[in-house]
Each structure stands twice: as structure tokens, then as C-alpha cells.
Amino acid sequence: MANVSHDQNFKNLIVDYPRDALAFFAAEEAPEPGDDVHIAPLRQEQLKERLGDRFRELDAPLEVQWADGRRDAVLFVVEEETQPRRFSPHRLAHYCLDLAQMFGTNRVVPVTIFLRGSGAAPASLALGTERNTYLTFRHLACRLAETPYEDWRDSGNVAALVNLPNMRVPPERRVDAYADAVRGLAAVETDLDRRAKYMEFIDAYADLDEDEYRRYEREYAEESTAMAGAIQRARNEGRQEGRRQGRQEGRQQGRQEGTRSVLERQLQRRFGLLSPRVAERLRRASAGDLETWADQVLDADSLDEVFRPSR
């Protein structure tokens, strides 16, 4: 599983399916199924700007707001950690304190997703002396490798389904877990692009060898063919849309370059050699600005009049 960005994969999953992610990774504190809530990711750019040099780019902070106001908003700080031995409660605690101060709340739930291994990661942090404890910190831990896959195979929760191969799976059931993940994703996700995206997630973490994949195609032939067809359709549609957008953007860019070239020649004829400052202004100008200046150059007596804002 070389070159897999676990942080980015789980960040995408949490942002794409925030409610399912909280229900699976943080069931103890997640909104109830019937709750009317708004869940929004906190943008990393926003955090960088507001935390400055103290910014620690963990995975996916989420803000949960209850529509009826019966509960105050809660910040969920979700961090993926590949190996428990690498987990630092000090780092996570520091980040949670930063967020709590930034958003003026004490309602923060730290969540850690342990992807691999069963090593001992600290469940809490206590600062103090033999006489007193002055600061304590706990976090919710989701240990995927210790979670029985049978408990979630029929759940309908996308975050859980695509992680079935990451759960505790008997070696002889690896192909079945892969098939359950594929079947579950197809049942709950109707968007072909999303389906293709998370098939890649399942493939990456199932990591079937050639013999296992042939067994899957043999024992689950109908599902394999249907999913392959759906993914191919999504890819074809994506390529067609990409080509269409590319042609449209290319035409627009070509028109803009043509307008810029004509305007540059007109300015040189009227006012002589252009300074580097004017050349740079032309290079950075929008299509709308170029069209405005091209109209104004006809009657202008100076460069200032060309670049004068139109009324």
C-alpha cells in the first residue's frame, strides 16, 4: 500500500460523509439519528490564518450545530493516526485548546482513529504532581483493527462500510469483507463519481492479491461486473466533462489573449514603448478589464485615461 495518503483519505471521507463519520468514529458523542443538525468542516485556511504559527494541521475539525438550539454547538476534532505508538496526546490536547480558545467554547470532542496495530496508545493525559492533578485530557478512540467487521457489514453507514477491510477480519474472510464493502457502498451511494472515488478507497485498504481478486470476481461475478460498469461510466462522464470544460476554458483563454495582444499593439502605437509596470498590468488583467481598456484607448489622450475606471 505504498504512497497512500492516509490523512488525506480519511479527511476526504469525513468531509464527504460527516454524519456517518461521527456516528461511526465517535458514536458516544455523535448526534442522534433523528436530530436536525448542521455539520460543517472548519476550513484549514481559516485555521491557519487565525492560529498563525501555532497552527497544527490535524485532519478534520467539524462543527455540529443543532437546529432547535437544545444543545450548544460542539467541535469534533478528528485525527487519523496510522500507528498507536505514534500518537501524541500532548499534540492533540494542545490543538483542542487552541480551537476552544479560537471559537470561544469548551464543547470540544477529541476523536482519534487508529488505523493499524493494537499497540498501547495513551487513553488520557494527566499533568500534575504526586499530590495533585491539575490538567486532564481524554479522547475518544476508534481502533479499526480491533473492530469486528461483522458488526458493521450491514450497517448502511458509508464511513463504516468503506472501512470494512480495515477492521478485524479473519484471513479467510478478506474477500468477503471486500465484497461486503463494495456491495454496501453500491447500495447507499447513488452518485457515480462518489462511488468510483470510494471504490478506490476500498481497493487501497483491502489490498487484495491477484488470487484473492480472482476469487472475488469468480464468487461475486454479478456484483463485480455491475460495479466495474458503474465506475467506468463515471470515469467516462468525468473525462467528457473535463474535455468539455477544457475546450470552453481554452476558447475563453484564447479570446482573452487575443484581446490583450490587440490592446498592447494599440497602446504602443498611441503612447510608445510600454513600461514593465504597464506590461505587467496587462498580463494580470481580467477579460472584462481588457475589453474596457480596449474601448477607452480609442479616445484616450494618455495611459491614465485608458486605465481610468469606467463609469
Image (cartoon, helix red, strand yellow):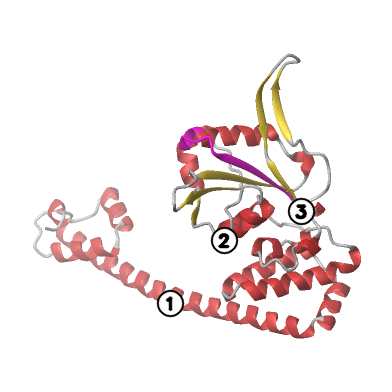
Mark 2: which amino acid? Asp
Numbered disc 1: secondary structure: helix
Closer to the observer: label 3 or label 1? 3
Identity of the residue furthest to the right in this view: 172
Q: Depth check: 274 or 60 in front? A: 60
Q: Which of marks 2 and 3 precedes in the sequence?
A: 2
In the shown orientation, is residue 161 left or right of residue 94? Answer: right
Residue 16's disc is 2
Numbered disc 2: secondary structure: helix
Visible in this render: residue 93?
yes
Separation of marks 3 and 1 at Cα, in angstroms: 45 Å
Residue at 56 percent of width and 74 percent of height: 191
The part of the chain drawn in magenta is 101-114
Numbered disc 3: secondary structure: helix
Q: Which residue is mark 3?
A: 144
Q: Depth check: 307 or 96 in front? A: 96
Separation of marks 1 and 2 at Cα, in angstroms: 29 Å
Residue 220: x %, y % from top left: 80, 81
Q: Which residue is mark 1?
A: 247
Q: Which of marks 1 and 3 precedes in the sequence?
A: 3
* Crowd around label 2: few <14 · some 14–19 · many ≥20 (10 Å): some
Q: Is residue 106 magenta?
A: yes
Separation of marks 3 and 2 at Cα, in angstroms: 19 Å
In the shown orientation, is residue 294 left or right of residue 24? Answer: left
Mark 3: which amino acid? Leu
Q: Quadrant of the N terminus?
A: bottom right
